[in-house]
Structure formats: structure tokens, C-alpha cells
Image (tube, rainbow, N blue to C red):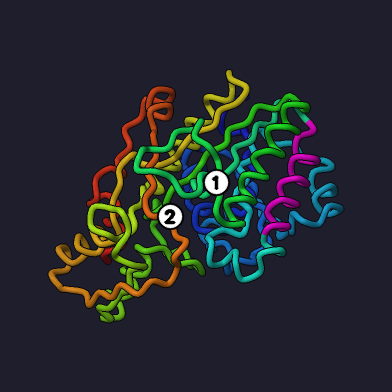
Amino acid sequence: MQKRNKKILITGGAGYIGQNLVSFFLKEKYKIYVIDNLSTSDSMNPKLKKRIHFSKIDLTKENKVKFFFKKKNFDLIIHLAAFSGVQTFNKNVLKSFNNNVLSTRNLVRYGFNKQKTKLIFSSSAAIYGKVSKDRVNESSDCEPVNYYGLSKLACESIIKNDLKEKKNNFAILRYFNVVGSSVDFKINKKVYSLFDIISDNIKRKKFKININGNSFNTKDGTPERDFIHIKDLCLIHKKAYEYLKKNKKIILNCGSGKRYSVLEIIKEFERKIKRKFHITYKLTNPNETHTICANINLLKNLFKINIESKKINNLIRDYLY
């Protein structure tokens, strides 16, 4: 079978990461199917939607999921569909938690009728919880401090247990902070990241921003994060799929292995636009993780790729337009 005939299903494919992956795999000549209930995104971009098979389905509805997969089989399922981001998640914790877990349970139960079907699951660095200044690796303790991280950890358990029994190969990718875009059109996002907030403020000529505290145990007192560009993340998904053709499973951190503080990011934007922000340091989330950074040795050793996200200029390049 030629690669152009391979079928990939992307759940949550109308979201920010989903549409970037759709665009990426279309360029790789795969046949793309998308499931999304459109609860956290407005719609699929028309340029993409006309090139894929789209179904509006809520994965928490068991009968609808069962019916969808009744006569369909896929070579790869990329499972992104979830309520994500702590702030969005906390608006209705019970609903969000149940959504993520039920969606995964139903997908695993009905989407893997053929042993050839492989899974890539989008997990999160949130499963690690509050960590030390050491880089976290895939064997680090998982002690999530919020229900979003707990939901992702629960989904990982479902996948490990159920797909082991079904004998399907799977990859669990633990995303760190994803930024940027690999597509040439705007994707509307309802959840704003730090980079989106800064970019939006620049476009609106509103040069004010708040940082969640400046007295953390970090190099400049502000929170530190590991940011990965979506271009790198898409390539990791391609490499993971290739890996699963010969291997049963893999759990990987998807970060850059580089730690930047919130203040550093703002200062770099200031240098690019030659304009200062008025910065406040009101503590709005005292439970925020002070610092986190991925150990990506396993990722680099297995996939032999150069993570471009280590360079701060590559992180902000898509936000200055």
C-alpha cells in the first residue's frame, strides 16, 4: 500500500494543534479524517475542510462513536480531542474531567478493531505537577496538581491498559507549551497562550501585560516554561508514526529542552518591536508551577531530529505580523 492511501483520523482536528497537524499530514499525502464537536473551536478552516473528511461528533456519546467506527478503519488515530488548559478546564471541572476520560475510553474501545491501527495520544507536561529545577524525564514521578493534569494521566492509564490487551501499538506524547503555526492562514483560538496575549496586545497597541508573580524561585522570579514550536511538534508526530510501525509503544516528552522565563519572552518581544510593555506582577494563580523543563534525550536519540524551538527567535517568529 502506498503512503498516499494511508488513512489518518485526527480527533479534535478543528483545534489549534489539530489544524496544524491536518495541514502537515496533507502535505505528506495522507488521507485525513477529522472528528470534532466544535466545542472549543469555531470551525475547520475552509481551505483545509474541503480537503478532508469531517464529522461533527461528540466522543463522549458512546453510541455515536460506536456507529462511526462500525465500518471504518484507520492506519493511525491521533487523539487530541479534550478540554485543555487549566483555566478552561476549571470552568467546569467535573464536566471537563469526564469529557477527557470518557472520550478516550470510547475511542479506545471502538476505534481499534484492527490490530494495524496505531494511536498517538496528546498528553501533557501537566501530569508531572510541581517539579524541581531538574529537567523532567519520562520516568519522573507523575503527581499532577490540577484536574486537567489528572485527566491526562487517567487517559494515559486507559491507553496503556486497554491497548496492551488489544495489542495495538501506541505513542503517548507529553506536550509542553506549544507555540507558533505551520499554516499560512489564521486559526481562531479561544484559549490564549502567553505568546497570543503578547501578540494581541501589540496588534491592539495595548502595551500592558501582567505576569503571575515575580518572587518564584527562578532566575528572574517569574515562572519558567519549556516552549516547543508547532513545526517541531508536527515532525515529532510523523516520526512517532514511523516508529510505531516497528515498535509496540513509546512515551515521549515533547519540549525543546530549553527553559525561558515569562519575563524573558516579553523582553524579547520588546526588542523586536522596539517598544516597552508596562509590566505588572499581580499573583493571580499561586498554585502555578514555578519552573518546568523537559529532558528530551530520549526524543533526540530515537528520532534524530534537531529541535529548532531552542532558539527564542524561532519561537516568536509567527507572532510579529
Amino acid carrying label 1: it is Ile
- What main secondary structure does the magenta stretch of the protein show? helix
Camera-nearest label, 2 or 1:
2
**Quarter of the figure with residue 200:** bottom left
Q: Estimate the x, y position of residue 147 in percent, counting from the top left.
A: 61, 57
Residue range in magenta is: 97-113
Whether residue 26 is visible here, answered yes or no, is no
Quarter the C terminus occupies: bottom left
24 sits left or right of 53 in the view: left
Residue 225 colored in magenta in the image: no
Crowding at dot 1, Cα within 10 Å, few <14 / some 14-19 / many 20+, comes out as many
> At 36% across and 47% down in the image, what residue appears?
226
| Label 2 element class | loop
Q: Which residue lies under the disc numbered 1? A: 127
| Label 1 element class | helix
Q: Which residue lies under the disc numbered 2? A: 289
Q: Estimate the x, y position of residue 223 in percent, counting from the top left.
A: 34, 58
70 sits left or right of 144 in the view: right
Q: Nearer the viewer, residue 30 or 160?
A: 160
Q: How many marks?
A: 2
176 sits left or right of 50 in the view: left
In terms of sequence position, does the residue under pointer 2 or pointer 1 come before the other? 1
**Residues at marks 2 and 1, CA–CA distance in whole angstroms:** 12 Å
